[in-house]
Amino acid sequence: MAEQEPDHPDESSPETDTSADDQATEVNEDSVEQSVSAEEQAADAIATAQDAIDAVSAEAGSAAEQTSDAQSLDLPAFDDNHHAGSLECEELQLLNDVQLNVKIELGRTMMYIEDVLRMNENSIVELDKAAGDPVDIYVNDRHVARGEVLVLNDNFCVRVSEIVQSPQAES
């Protein structure tokens, strides 16, 4: 019968053990070289990072010096009525001194001249609209909006509630 090679390493021949030891030594030398090389790479990376930190610190120091040297910033003047660079705003400013005739119509009535002549300070005039009805707003005799009458700080005011779509159609 032919001899079979042993399945277990313990039963191997001494020649096999020697070559395995040589391979293990080579593997250990390779891993030592790799770990030394990894340590060198890590040291290089740390040195590069430290150089970068030093460079950033130097730039930050010079920027802080420049900031402390600055006296003031030249900012554009901002006011409520003008937006810099706005052509539309400049065009609207042309209308600032245009006078418009604004009328609020609370209601209408027909009266005889003799009744108008008898009116005094405490006279009451009946109108064709009820107390809560919207009032008409006219600008230069054109009907442009409707609103509601309010009292604010003992003054009469009108809150615009609707803009008339085609002021030319209504008169």
Image (cartoon, rainbow, N blue to C red):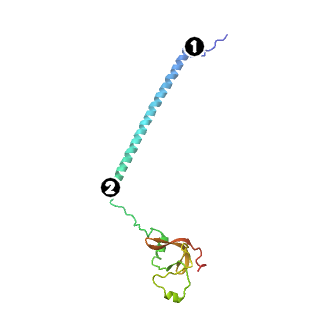
87 and 55: which is toward the camera: 87
52 and 148: which is toward the camera: 148
Q: CA distance from mark 1 to mark 2?
A: 82 Å
Vertical side of 145 occupied by 33: above or below = above
Circle 1 SS class:
helix
Q: Which mark is residue 11?
A: 1
Where residue 136 sits in the image (x, y, percent)?
55, 76
Q: Picture quarter containing residue 9?
A: top right
Vertical side of 50 occupied by 160: above or below = below
Q: Which mark is residue 168?
A: none
Q: Are marks 1 and 2 in contact (CB under 8 Å)?
A: no
Q: Residue furthest top?
A: 1
The image quadrant where one finds the N terminus is: top right
Give the residue at x 41% y 39%: 46
Give the residue at x 39% y 47%: 56
Give the residue at x 52% y 87%: 115
131 and 34: which is toward the camera: 131
Q: Picture quarter containing residue 13?
A: top right
| Amino acid identity at mark 1 | Glu
Which class describes the residues within 10 Å of circle 1: few (<14), some (14-19), or many (20+)? few
Circle 2 SS class:
helix
For disc 2, the marked residue is 68
Vertical side of 6 occupied by 66: above or below = below
Where residue 171 sits in the image (x, y, percent)?
58, 80
Q: In the rendered picture of this protein, how many numbered marks are placed on residues?
A: 2
Which of marks 2 and 1 precedes in the sequence? Answer: 1
Which class describes the residues within 10 Å of circle 2: few (<14), some (14-19), or many (20+)? few
Task: For marks 1 and 2, give the one nearer the viewer.
Answer: 2
Vertical side of 40 occupied by 150: above or below = below
| Amino acid identity at mark 2 | Ser
Where residue 89 sits in the image (x, y, percent)?
47, 71
